[in-house]
Image (cartoon, rainbow, N blue to C red):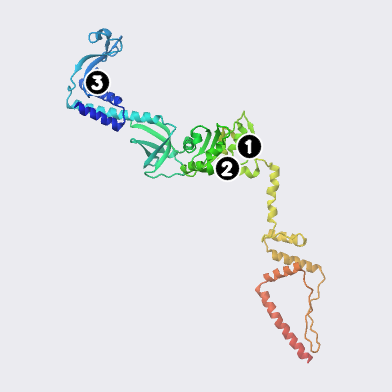
Amino acid sequence: MSRDFVGALLQLNAEKQVPRDHLIRTVEEAIAAAYRRVANEEDIHVRIDAESGKIRVFRARTAVSEVEDPLTQFTLDEARPYKTDAVLGDLVETEQLDSDAFGRIGAQTAKQIVLQRIREVERDQVFDSFVNREGELLTGTVNRVEPRAIILDVGKNVEAILATTEQSPLEHYRIGQNVKAFVLEVRRTPRGPQILVSRSHKGFLRRLFELEVPEIHNGTVEIKAIAREAGSRSKVAVASRQDGLDPVGATVGQRGARVQAVVAELGGEKIDVIPWNDDPSQFVANALSPAQVEGVVIDEEARVANVIVPERMLSLAIGRGGQNASLAAKLTGWRINIRSDMPAEAARPVVAAEPVEAETSTNGSVPDAGEPDVVPVMAEVASTGEAPVKAAKTAKAAKAAAKPKATAATSAKAVKGETAEAVEQPAPKPKARAAATKAAATKPAAAKATKVAAPKAATKRTKKAEEVAS
């Protein structure tokens, strides 16, 4: 029986990874608790020989000067008959008990207590091993997906809870996937230790950089501050402890290899690495990267930084939804006010200049300054929405009315052997020719039919004149 007991202890030691001395002490307390329940006495103790496995059960009390609990304590004079050299605080054995004193019920009780104590010891050991890992990274496997959390198996039958609020919006998880997480807190609960982890905490980003950047791991480059909006954007301020070492270049890596590894782990989250500066104004200017800053005025009493940026950089400095300015404020610890370098008076002509572009014609052409008579008409047409061709035709008609009428009549000379010839009109100017061409293109089909019919009428009149002459 003793050999079997020692073998069972060794097996528990191998399975539960509980120290042997701690395991034996736990079994001693469990068997003693079972004896106390059967005998209904409190002065029963148990000792186990780790080598032979022999169990010794006895009664013992503690020697004290003043007795507070008569079931477990007695005076020094009462202890002297059992142990002559007893001193205060000694556990004095008073009676040896038979280890086979209790029967089947007692043995079953002892078994249950032993198993319960071993579970408690195992939980305490797990708690002690993980409580020292708060603020570190651990890798787990997705065990199950619940509506409010992801349960990770981190080994040794221990589960970690990744709550929905601690997850990145860009990430999706599947059963069996390996996931890195940041240990937020380890709690002691009746069901065992509870490990809370996060992937949205800024400490998670710090630990990832320590894994990817050797200079940060060995302390040559220090991460001074981190501002993060999980799943969207992060800003990291770094400083060098070694002269001549570029902290930003070391963190980013060659062709961005190091920072890209961190971005890939975060599911594509954007990361801005900026240099740390002891000067608040320079640090605030760096924090607003990638926007360029013209000047920073620091108000130390109100802890406000007034930033001036170029007009073209205003939207970039503020960011979408104010994200860039908000992250810069979190990173620096200053309240940041951003304004453009362009005063309000200078901005008005820019807005007033917009109607000037609307004065151009509908086809996108600008009126020619060489024809002052046409320009007002073109502007008027553009405002009313009519076609520019019609406007040019109106201007041409106005010019023609101002000039003397040209004799364009066609006379038929009743000369023998001669046919009627049309008097040639003077050649129009190039601009007038272009306007006439456009006007001809816009004439309706009826006008074209009239032109076709006109030569036929002229031919009939010529035949009649020839008949009269003959």
Residue position marked by numbered label 3 in the rendering? 47
Mark 2 → mark 3, Cα distance in angstroms: 71 Å
Residue position marked by numbered label 2 in the rendering? 319
Q: Nearer the viewer, residue 207 or 281?
A: 207
Mark 2 → mark 1, Cα distance in angstroms: 14 Å
**Residue shown at 19% from the left, 18% from the top:** 97
**Residue shown at 68% from the left, 48% from the top:** 351
Identity of the amino acid at label 1?
Answer: Val
Task: Determine whether 356 is above or below 165 in the image.
Answer: below
- Viewed as shown, does residue 239 lie left or right of 352? left
Residue 374, x across and y down, in percent: 75, 62
Q: Is tag 1's residue or tag 3's residue first in the polypeptide sequence?
A: 3
Task: Determine whether 90 is above or below 460 in the image.
Answer: above
Q: Is tag 2's residue or tag 1's residue first in the polypeptide sequence?
A: 1
Q: Is tag 2's residue or tag 3's residue first in the polypeptide sequence?
A: 3
Mark 2, residues whose alpha carbon is within 10 Å: few (<14), some, or many (≥20)? some
- Viewed as shown, does residue 449 lie left or right of 218? right
Residue 255, x across and y down, in percent: 53, 44
The quarter of the picture where the C terminus appears is: bottom right
Residue position marked by numbered label 1 in the rendering? 307
Identity of the amino acid at label 3?
Answer: Arg
Residue 170, x across and y down, in percent: 46, 44
Marks 2 and 3: which is nearer the front?
Answer: 3
- Viewed as shown, does residue 368 lie left or right of 190? right
**Residue shown at 71% from the left, 83% from the top:** 457
Marks 1 and 3: which is nearer the front?
Answer: 3
Mark 3: secondary structure = strand
Tell me if label 2 and label 1 are in contact, CB under 8 Å. no
